[in-house]
Each structure stands twice: as C-alpha cells, then as structure tokens.
Amino acid sequence: MANRMRIAMAAVGLLLFGLALGAYAQTPAFHDIRPGYGVTAIGWLSDYHPPLRGTPGDSRVYILDSGVPGGTLYVQGGTHGNEIAGVMAATILVERAIPTVGRIIVVPHGNNANVDYNDGYRSGVPSYVTIEVQGGVPRSFRYGSRRTNPAYEAEPDPDIYVSPDGGVHEGNEIRNLNRVHPGKPDGTLTEQIAYAIRQLLIEENVDVAIDLHEAGVNSRLANTLVAHERALEAAVYAVLDLSAQGLHFNLEPSRQEYRGLSHREWGDHTKALAFLTETANPGQTDEYTAPDVVNDPKNPLHDRVGRQLAAVRAIVDAAVLLGAPPVSYEGVPTYADLVRDGLGPWLNAPTAQP
Amino acid sequence: MRNAGTVLLLSTLLVGVLAAAPAMAALEAPALITSAGQSPGALMVRVLADQAGVANVYDATAGLDQLAGAKSLIIVVGASMKGLGAAGIDVDQEFARIESLLVEATSRGIPVVAMHVEGAPRRGSTSDDLSVLVLEYADHAIVRADGNEDGFFTRLAEEHDVTLQLVERTAEAGAVLKTLYGN
C-alpha cells in the first residue's frame, strides 16, 4: 500500500513537473533589456494579434513617444536571432534613445521563438554573448538562430514553402520570419508573428520601418541597405549620407520576386517606407572556423552596431528630408562614439551594486 | 541640426575635392544621366548631380531620343542582373543601347563622363565589360577608389586618354561633378 502511494505520488509529481515544464516552454523568452528614460510604454506583439499571447513567439514592444506630434519610426532586431548586431542596435535604442519629435517603436527580438535554438547553420557560434558594462558588470545577450525553434511549431517543415503572397522557398524557410511576411492570422507560429508585426505597422501608423540584419563577411549582402521601391530615393540619400561619414553601404532595391521578405511585404501591405540593413557578421561566415562574434578584429560587434545605428539615423533623416512626417531623437551613440568607446558604456549598467 | 551637420560635412568634402581637382574646361548642362547595367548607382549620381547644381535628365534606360537635348552624357556603370531583369533588358540589349548612345554622342561632339560609384562590390565581369566599352568613348571618368584597387580603371583611362578622378567616398563624386560643370 505504501509502495502504491509512493508510486502514485511520484506519478503526480512527474505530471506536475511536466505540466510546469510545458507551461515554461510556452512562456516567451525574457531578455536583459533595461529601458531608458525615452521608453514611455511597453507592450507585446500579442497586443496586435492576441493568439500570440502565452506563446514563445510573443515579444516585447517598446514605445518611445516624444509627446511632440510627428511621424512613427519602427525598428526591429532579431528577425534572425544570430544576427546579433541588429539585436544590440535595437537594445541600445531602447536603453538610450530620447525621442524629441514623433515616436519610435522598437522590437529587439522580432522572432523571439528562435533565441533558444541552435540550428547548426554555422558551427562555433555561442548561445550568448557577454558585454562588460560600466563597473565591470557583465551583461549577457542571447545568440539565437536564423529560424524558429522547430519544437514551437505544430507541424514538421514541408518540402516546399509558399509564402502568403506566393513566394516559393525551401521547406524549412516556413520557420524563417523573413520569408513568411505578411503572415497569416491562423498560420504557423512564425506566420502569426509576421502577422502581428504587420498589424503593429498598420495600427501604429508607422511611416518608416527598418528590419536590422547581418550577413556573412564575404556575402554580397554585407553592408547593404535594401529598400522597397517607394523607399528607394530615401535609401539613395541615406547611402550617400553614410558615404559622407566614411561608411560604405551597397544599395539593393527590393524586387517583386522577394516575396515573403520584410522590405517587400511591409512596403506592399502597409504605408511604411520599408528598409532592411545588413552588416558583416563573422559568425555567419563559412570560411571562419572559430568566429568571435564580439571581438573579431575586422568586424567587431561595436563597429557593426555603430553601422546599424548610423544607417537607422541616415534613413530617418533622408525620409524626413523627402517628406515623411518628422521623427527625431537624441542620446544614441554615433558610429564614432561606438568605435571610441565600445558597446559597454552605451548599455545601461546596474544602478546599485549588490 | 544633424542635417546641418551632414551639409557641413559634405561641404567640407566638396572643398577638399575642389582643391585637389585638376583644371579643365567646364562641361555643359543639361546632362543626360543613364545607367550601364541597371544598378542603383545611376540614381545615386542623379541625386549627387542635383546637389551639385548640374541640370540633368535622368533615365536609367535612355535611348537616342533622350540624347536629343543633352549637352553632355553621364553613364554610370554597374551591372545588376536583378536590375536588368526588373527593367526587362538582357545583357546584350544593354550593351547595344549603351554603344548606340556612345556612338551618337561622339558623332555629335557631346562629351561623355563615365562613372563607377559603387566601389568594389559592383565590380564583376559584366560591369567590367561595360566599363571597357564606356571608357573607350569617355572624356572623363569618376571612380570610387575601392573599385580600382587592381588598377583596372587606371589602365583603361591611360589606354584611352581619359581624365580619371578617384574618390574615396561615393558622396565625393558630387564635388567632382560640380567642378567638371564649373558650378
């Protein structure tokens, strides 16, 4: 009898543990992001598509409202969790930007369901990167993957994936956020994330939308700005502005065949001028066997984040110059600031030592 | 405030390039600006020409009709297969269009400026073949220096007696245009 009781209790314990594990697995990942004074509200992607609530695809939405009428800028990092310069640039915007005209909306982890997954796409890359901030305190940031963790999708990958607007891709791209735009309200988890983002862009009346990415060091996409055709002239001005600062960016117009990609679908399905930036990440480079994604001598993380932030600034200035509603902000480091200081001083540190 | 800073930076670059530019007879506007290869470089040059006060007509796929009112021809080299595809042009058609413009401009005494402003990433066999074609007819060439690290444009310019000016940054090409057009 006692044995039966022990077995029953063990079974109940296992059941409860399993349920707890299941609930934990369905909780969106939280990140070490310490909002600064510019942040006036914090929401979720699920505010724009409620079925995402309680799933690993939900993600924080940071709103920085100047209170001064103007336009709305949307910046997204982490579409691909391994493209860490975009995540860090978005994080610095949340922690440092003070809007002075209009609003900035930042989602540092566009696909929060890829942050705990290593898809083996590249070997030798870390699960976390650590940055030492003021006072020598380490802060850690997840280094995720290109695609959604398959454990979070209900169905296995198909052989061929056709995006909502007809883009034909390899089957595993069904878990790549940047192939499934503009998403589906009743689609896969990844498609629902894309749908929530589309709803955000529409409901928040976003004027300029920027998706921050990285590519391999030797990729033709490294240090490139891609722009929807409605945004192309602003992109030209932005590239020339960056050039004047000594930062070479290639310009790539979005094409009709890029179905499912953000610069194509955001530009087609919302009023936003849509852009995508790419910097050069050693962690995505086939030729590197042991990439250092933070301290690579040619493409250190602070340099890449500086390029991302410079591109965001140049895009905003160009769009406003050409007639977009004004958006302005201060407090964000320039490329030169980050080359001089590194990332640490520009990330918020604990206000008190334990 | 930051726009003012950008203008100041561009002005500083302009002064620097002006000081370094050799003396030469000014070209006349309006300029017809077209692409050889359908990359975005031609659109960049249109913006730079506007900023430099060079009156221009921009048409990435210009034909002989567009050359009628032009007093100079700026051809911006940069091959993009996707750009050609989007414009509905194949490589052979692009070469034929550019050659017809060059031949016609030469026969009418219209000076030709060759530009390659997208640097090393926009080098490649098709771009290089287009550069060979355009520099054969060009009077001036403006090239971003990282696209000439192998001396490709230097050799072409020497071979065809073309005045070559290298710029470190794409944005500096506007200052060279300003000088060429005497603005």
Image (cartoon, coloured by chain):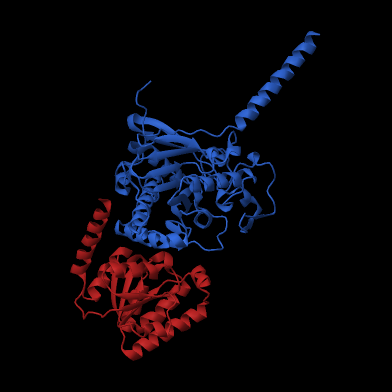
* Colour used to depict chain B in the structure image: red
Q: Position of residue A238 (x, y in %)?
A: 36, 58
Query: As drawn, which residue projects farthest toward the bottom?
Result: B107
Give above or below for A242 relative to A16.
below
Query: As drawn, which residue projects farthest toward the front?
Result: A69
Give above or below for A22 relative to A103.
above
* Colour used to depict chain A in the structure image: blue
**Residue depicted at 39% across the width and 36% down the height:** A39
How many labels, in total? 0
Query: As drawn, which residue projects farthest toward the right?
Result: A1
Give above or below for A262 relative to A43.
below
Q: Quadrant of residue B40?
A: bottom left
Is residue A294 among what the camera can see?
no
Q: Is residue B113 left or right of residue A270?
A: left
Q: A219 or A55, which is in the foreground?
A: A55
Q: Position of residue A7 (x, y in %)?
A: 76, 15
